[in-house]
Image (spheres, grey):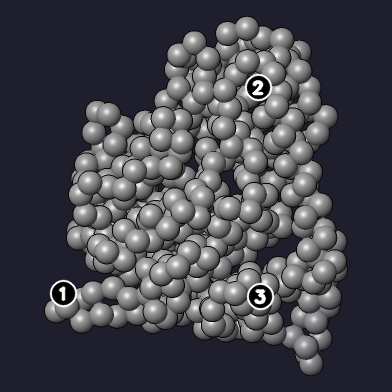
């Protein structure tokens, strides 16, 4: 008899996007001519930078000839990409990262999900609420939590409430935690931690022998100087933090797939006998055992963004989205709504008016404005009373949506 991993049974169905689709299609059935605008898109919509296309076309051609064909590459990634990342995102910015501390992957979702495998099942996990679901769900699957409770939280997880009251800068946990997931700039709230606020977490990790798992998928969207682009800008982080980065939102690679994880060799954690072990070696072992590298063609496409031309093209796409973000943010303010984020991230997190629940606001926006967004409660219980709009739409429909919202009363 083969038994299943029963931890999977603790997970509720992925209800959020299915429920949104269900409500939208029910509305459309009654109102077939409605012009629905989607501001809930969590995916980029602009095409890949031209430099990436050209680099990938060239790489495809190399694959066509015996002399230049490539089979398996290094599991950790090709040196041309690792060096470009190391130089551009770290050493040129005064952060001391070595090439063998960078692991190329097929994207950050896998890395954020897989990293927990190198940690003990007995660790206590801290997660912000609301949150990108991958951190929590993968720890549930691994058995690092109890069951889902009435209040929407999992037993045994330390939740760090993140809301307008604490300016989206959660308080340190009152009980000891071993693994801390932070996402900055944040999905879904679009907010960030300042360097001083992040330093508080690094200090906590150092004092409590914890590890910070830092998701910086939106680093390229940061516009303000005091927001850390990398956790390693914070003094002491090189001993306690793992960083996840992705080409998905940076360069439109959501369907192309490339990301990377940085694990400085100075980051260590304990075995039961008290001996200390670098996480870099454990991750390297895992990566080489379970992963055979990201496609050469894709890595060429990713490396191309680090040329001057590539940087200019990436910036242009990000500026387009961030102009949408500005239009939404200012439009909501003009409409008398309270909104957060949208300055260092392509997400706007609005406080629902008149104390409406997230799903009630969803229905009002759909029925009265024909606009689809994402109910905040779908990202965790603390998201109740909030609503996420995204800047990934096109300019014209973003403007039209904002115009409609301005005319609504709630
Ligand atoms: C989009 C996103 C990622 C990137 O995932 P990929 O697998 O690289 O596409 C990672 N973290 C967060 C919070 C995201 O929103």
- Residue that protrudes farthest toward the top in the picture: 409
Q: Is residue 94 above or below residue 150?
A: below
Distance between the alpha carbons at the discs numbered 2 and 3: 38 Å
> Residue, x 47% and y 45% (percent of image)?
132
Q: Residue furthest left?
A: 273
Residue pictured at 60% horizontal, 19% vertical:
337
Q: Quadrant of residue 293?
A: bottom right
Q: Considering only order in the chain, which callout, 3 or 2, is on the residue closer to the N terminus?
A: 3
Disc with the residue nearer the chain's start (1 vs 2): 1
For marks 1 and 2, give the CA distance: 53 Å
Q: Secondary structure at mark 2?
A: helix
Res 347 quadrant in image = top right
Judging by the rendered image, the residue that carries numbered circle 3 is 92
Which numbered circle lies on residue 272? 1
- How far across and how far down the image is residue 406, in percent? 71, 14
Q: Secondary structure at mark 1?
A: loop
The answer to whether residue 21 shows anywhere in this view is no
Residue 224 visible? The answer is yes
**Cβ–Cβ under 8 Å for marks 1 and 2:** no
Mark in front: 1 vs 3: 3
């Amino acid at each position: 008899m083969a038994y299943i991993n029963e931890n999977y049974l603790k997970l509720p169905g992925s209800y959020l996007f299915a429920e949104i689709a269900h409500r939208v299609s029910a509305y459309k059935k009654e109102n077939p001519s409605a012009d629905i605008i989607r501001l809930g898109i969590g995916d980029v919509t602009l095409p890949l930078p031209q430099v990436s296309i050209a680099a990938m076309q060239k790489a495809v051609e190399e694959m066509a000839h015996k002399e230049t064909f490539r089979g398996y590459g290094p599991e950790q990634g090709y040196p041309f990409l690792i060096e470009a990342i190391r130089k551009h995102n770290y050493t040129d910015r005064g952060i001391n990262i070595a090439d063998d501390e960078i692991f190329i992957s097929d994207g950050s979702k896998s890395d954020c999900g897989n990293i927990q495998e190198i940690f003990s099942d007995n660790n206590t996990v801290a997660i912000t609420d609301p949150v990108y679901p991958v951190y929590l769900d993968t720890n549930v699957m691994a058995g690092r939590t109890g069951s889902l409770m009435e209040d929407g939280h999992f037993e045994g997880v330390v939740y760090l409430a993140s809301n307008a009251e604490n300016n989206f800068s959660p308080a340190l946990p009152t009980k000891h935690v071993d693994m801390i997931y932070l996402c900055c700039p944040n999905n879904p709230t679009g907010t960030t931690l300042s360097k001083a606020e992040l330093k508080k977490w690094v200090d906590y990790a150092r004092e409590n022998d914890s590890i910070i798992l830092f998701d910086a998928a939106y680093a390229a969207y940061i516009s303000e100087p005091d927001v850390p682009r990398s956790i390693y800008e914070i003094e002491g982080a090189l001993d306690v933090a793992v960083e996840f980065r992705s080409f998905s939102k940076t360069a439109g690679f959501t369907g192309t797939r490339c990301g990377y994880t940085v694990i400085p060799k100075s980051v260590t954690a304990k075995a039961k006998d008290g001996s200390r072990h670098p996480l870099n070696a454990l991750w390297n072992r895992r990566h080489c055992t379970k992963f055979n590298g990201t496609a050469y063609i894709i890595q060429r496409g990713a490396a191309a963004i680090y040329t001057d031309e590539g940087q200019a093209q990436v910036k242009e796409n990000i500026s387009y989205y961030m102009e949408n973000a500005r239009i939404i943010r200012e439009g909501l303010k003009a409409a008398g709504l309270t909104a957060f984020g949208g300055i260092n991230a392509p997400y706007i997190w609005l406080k629902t008016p008149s104390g409406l629940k997230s799903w009630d606001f969803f229905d009002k926006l759909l029925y009265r404005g024909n606009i689809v967004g994402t109910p905040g409660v779908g990202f965790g219980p603390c998201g109740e009373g909030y609503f996420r709009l995204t800047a990934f739409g096109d300019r014209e429909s973003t403007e039209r949506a904002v115009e409609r919202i301005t005319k609504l009363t709630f």
